[in-house]
């Protein structure tokens, strides 16, 4: 008789033999293609530490970011909310200063930031690329925002639909228009932690705001997002190079997309090339004929799965109504010839929409797949 | 054709639908039997926070302990080593005070502790059940230890074989004898973090020290011990009830065992009943006959796997040289009748030793399995 | 600096050291409470092998069932559809005969069965507890069914909403009434493989049919249901003992419930005691007072998670609208005192419905949780 | 308070929503670099089905191979051992014929094979690239082998150290020399299923035999090798293209390596380029100076982890004695400048041996890592 060996179980017995290498750290890269000559940087611009109401020391945020495949983070402790102040000193530049040497060592770009934490309106605003967080501590929120602008900050509205501040409706206040008109408010979070704000997507489209997804993390990351399936929300920034200035330029130029729980949202000009670069047809030529069934093999080299729904029938052959292209997997699907003309076709054209890839208009991204046939 | 469905992959696509319940927390119980009228409490007496050189806020240690199935923890920040002191206030009673209200809410027993952190000798010593950590800050280490004793502390030697303090050999110093003779030093760590100290086991046996296994954790627990296979080292305390005084009494009375990476070490009087309580024979009667093969089914209801090696042959039948009883699994093994007398035996006796259960003498625990046959 | 150790990764390096014990097999028990004096048997009554259009040898079905925690299976190869007949002999009693000795050895109850495989109406019917499968091979489907009855079979309708046989609607045919009236058809599958048939639930309630969930498995089980999250659908049978006759009596008496993907469906008389037996309040007394927050800890000792939705407010305190009680976990939830009278209450009463526990009427099961307070 | 969300658990609640796409299958590619102008094909040349003593239908072997990332398989049922013959027809060409159409559809190269199954000597021999398996059924084993040669077969010795045939010693018999001298025996299994045969490695080196690792699988693959950590043994074949003739030429030319449980064995000419192609230094220039610590980041793009042990010290800097490069991960390790000359070095040279990469001589592969410094 053959064995049923529960290897997963048995191996734990051997853990005691494990000699771990000293001081080694391990990083899981996030595979999303670079596009249009830009580098696709993985960023989280909204992160807390013990210096405000977070749970960890600032260096932990760098270790976590590096281990999880991020390129860029901003530590953005609350200016006005510091529940640990009995035990911690008050300097809000310290989280950056404490984390910066390690970030430089690890190759993580650490952006200086802070969260202006006010009642609604205007709610919570994150200012990044600032020079001095302590100067943002003002009684008047408008003055704090002007100070951020004078420091050259990029300011975005955090979790605009947060129930605690807007329990009944999610609205855009005159104060947000005022901030925009003053050249202060330039971005908005679509995802913050586990939450999604559909209104923010509409406003981003209408008002040309830069879209962001951030973790707004307080707990240790490995506690908030236990591996392997769950991952923190991230902002994809399409930057000319991996530098602080290129990231700032990209944010100003609306070159972002957001990713959370395998839903990717962004302008069509970014999403289409990401999809195209991510998939590969593994068959050389399919040679599909009438009444014939062939297996089309598509490899998805990215860490984003794609869920496809057929948006119009193909000519000469039938293909599945739904296709899932899991991350880092090859899928085999059946194509069936249904007319004699299919044999003569050089290319088989398939018409889908990606249901987990949403344009800034909130529409599913149309994607076409061309299969070499003859 | 049938499908190959990689559900693990596909389900991640659905995560976006996940509505998490607010403020809920989840705990994985650790299943190890209570024995001899004692409760088997799962304890970690050596833990750090941002108040010394750890990475997390004290409340995180309570959340982690609760989630991981622990009953008792001590936060034991270094008295003499506080690298965060530029940013943190100096009061070493604060980690306890910050964490205590949450511990009470969660039902975690939080023991007040501190780590006296000195060069070798005497190295690092943890004092638990103290009254005031600040009073342990003395220039002279002996005075610090006497102060701990006066506060009623239980003191144990941490990571006695730590290479950084004893790079070449692991020795017992006269200072440790002096501490023992003064009624101060009563325990010793066999496991500290990922390290095991065989010499400590020998000393514990010779000198009647209470054995402990602790995490000495600095990083977030979920980072240091990613689930599910790896778990922190724990001290098992066999206490009359789940109270601080009962734990203190148990430590004084040597009622502990230590567990790390599925290796359990302790006195035979504790290990034998743990093994006996953990396993169940699922067959009612085996009815083994000569030349017959029967499948014996043994269920291990505990979270500790048992690796068994046959220490002497059985009479009348043969059984495997090696048996693994994985945690929370039933194993089926073959018994073969090899003499005619087996048919008459009421009980089949099997003689093994558990290679991952070590007595305080460092010997593999002998275990016998009696199988009802007739 | 502290380490980020990806243990999951590193341990694979050690697999080469793994010496597996010869011929050992491992079983994961399914933990669902016994209720009302009955044993809760885990059963799959619809399984295929290479003897019809399945992919595996009959003994594999026994190994799989044992490893996955099942108690009872029926191998039910198609009478009329045997695509392997070029290579395989035609005797349909062979799958049972081949598998029976191993089933006896492993303690799996193997029920003799076969699938009468016809166009709609009446579609596919499974007959279990038959005596001779070969005699069911008749040109006329009615004769085959009568033969099954004469052999003492329990007959149920398979996958009644299977699109391939009823592409547009799912209907109950006169032929099914005829089969019922003749005392032949007594059960119906609610789940078959990955599919669920809501109409079948309605018919089962109206016509007093025994409900079943079966895998209808063709592929190797570990391929169809890769661990750990995905598991095959199972029929729970509440039987007086673990014997073929007791199972047959339970089926005749409608004593079943069905479980798939954590959805449990059955009569309220079975579901309520399962829920009650599965949960334990870990707090002794909560001592909740007005304006106070306490953490209620509930342990779910079963392998079925429970998703609870509040169906009416509690008196004197507030509790979460949604609670998830994951399998084998303790959950901590917040209760908040909102009136002075709460302090005087001996018991705190909470009113929920379990959204993944459906009664035979298709309603969510109402569940009450009583918390000792004073 | 922040949440501890066990997502892994919660997501299983949602499985019921899963609509699986019809007939889709998913493949996990095995990432091992192509080298020296060859394609690195992943092959398993020793596989059983129900046609001899295996547990599954031949098409399952194609599905498994495709899903697990293999390129080439041979189904090699026993000629002389067919325990299912009561129920199965006797034609040993059938497994190939049954599986071939699916293999063609999936793009799996299916090699025709059979296992000549004799007592020792010569034990079990696998013949692949045969024309007609039935003709290998001869009373005399020598005649069967000659027949295989006449069909153009490549013949290798299976599990040469199998305890059942050689319980006490593992020896090379005169019969094997005779087979070699007759131009029949050309290869040998180093790994077969879970077993490793060190003697086979020595003989392969001495006698210039082609080394192979095969699963010798009888159970369903997902049962024998539950994901994700455990994978079947595979033979790497370095072929000019992905065709049966190129594979045959590669086997004849000794162009193979073997992989099991992350141990890779093969000639240095193959292993060195695999290692070199698999790793990437992520730092552009390290700029290491005396007394300075820099973090070197190395990415391993392959599915083989590399365990490195320092074989000689570097000049001008120190680096870890042990490095683990997990599959598909970036590792960060510390380099410390220990002399003033390091600042002037253009390249930092590190000298290791890969302890899980063994040459055909059984030696750990020496690997050098050159780090751009200035």
Image (spheres, coloured by chain):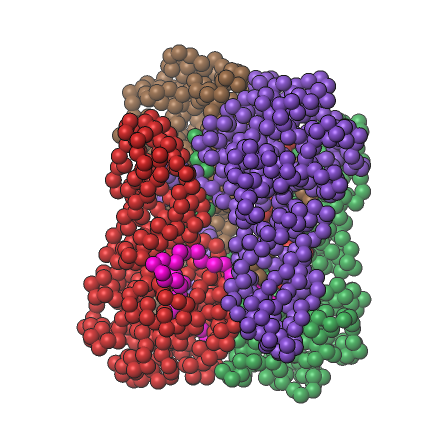
Chain colours: A green, B red, C purple, D brown
Residue at x 55%, y 72% (from the top left corner): C374
D117 relative to A247, above or below: above
User: For this view, does D145 lie left or right of residue A313?
Assistant: left
Say if residue D372 shows up in the picture. no
**Is residue B23 located in the magenta-colored stretch of the structure?**
yes
Residue at x 68%, y 35% (from the top left corner): C187
Number of numbered discs overlaid on the protein picture: 0
User: For this view, does A210 lie left or right of residue C224?
Assistant: right
User: For residue B341, what is the image quadrant?
Assistant: top left
| SS assignment for the magenta stretch, majority | loop
D290 relative to A321, above or below: below
Image quadrant containing the C terminus of chain D: bottom left
Percent x, y for residue A138?
Answer: 65, 87
For this rendering, which residue is in front, A23 or C335? C335
Image quadrant containing the N terminus of chain D: bottom right
Say if residue A53 shows up in the picture. yes
**Is residue C310 located in the magenta-colored stretch of the structure?**
no
For this rendering, which residue is in front, D313 or A59? A59
B341 relative to B213, above or below: above
Percent x, y for residue C15?
Answer: 40, 45
Residue at x 39%, y 67% (from the top left corner): B241
**Residue furthest to the bottom:** A139
Residue at x 55%, y 54% (from the top left corner): C278
Task: Read off the magenta span.
Answer: B22-50
Percent x, y for residue A30?
Answer: 58, 56
């Amino acid at each position: 008789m053959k064995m049923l060996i529960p290897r997963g179980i048995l191996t734990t017995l051997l853990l005691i033999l494990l000699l771990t290498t000293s001081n080694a750290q391990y990083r899981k890269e996030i595979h999303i293609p670079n596009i249009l000559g830009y580098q696709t940087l993985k960023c989280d611009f909204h992160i807390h530490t013990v210096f405000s109401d977070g749970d960890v020391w600032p260096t932990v945020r760098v270790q976590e970011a590096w281990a999880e495949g991020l390129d860029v983070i901003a530590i953005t402790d609350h200016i006005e909310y510091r529940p640990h102040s009995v035990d911690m000193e008050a300097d809000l530049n310290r989280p950056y200063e404490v984390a910066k040497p390690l970030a430089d060592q690890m190759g993580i770009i650490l952006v200086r930031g802070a969260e202006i934490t006010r009642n609604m309106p205007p709610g919570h605003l994150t200012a990044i690329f600032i020079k001095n967080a302590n100067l943002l501590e003002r009684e008047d929120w408008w003055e704090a925002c002007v100070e951020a602008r004078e420091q050259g900050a990029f300011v975005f509205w955090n979790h605009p639909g947060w129930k605690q501040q807007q329990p009944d409706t999610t609205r855009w206040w005159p104060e947000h228009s005022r901030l925009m008109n003053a050249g202060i408010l330039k971005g908005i979070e679509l995802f913050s932690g586990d939450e999604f704000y559909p209104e923010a997507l509409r406003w981003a489209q209408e008002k040309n705001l830069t879209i962001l997804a951030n973790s707004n993390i307080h707990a240790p990351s490995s506690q908030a997002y236990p591996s392997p399936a769950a991952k923190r929300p991230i902002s994809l920034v399409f930057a000319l190079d991996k530098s602080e200035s290129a990231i700032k330029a990209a944010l100003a130029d609306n070159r972002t997309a957001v990713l959370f729980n395998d839903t990717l949202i962004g302008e069509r000009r970014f999403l289409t090339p990401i999809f195209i670069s991510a998939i590969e047809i593994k068959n050389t030529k399919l040679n599909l004929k009438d009444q014939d069934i062939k297996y089309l093999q598509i490899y998805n080299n990215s860490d984003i799965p794609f869920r496809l729904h057929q948006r119009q029938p193909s000519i000469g052959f039938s293909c599945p109504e739904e296709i899932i292209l899991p991350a880092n997997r090859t899928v085999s699907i059946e194509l069936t010839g249904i007319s004699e003309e299919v044999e003569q076709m050089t290319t088989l054209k398939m018409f889908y929409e990606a249901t987990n890839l949403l344009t800034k208009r909130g529409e599913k991204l149309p994607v076409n797949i061309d299969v070499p046939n003859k």
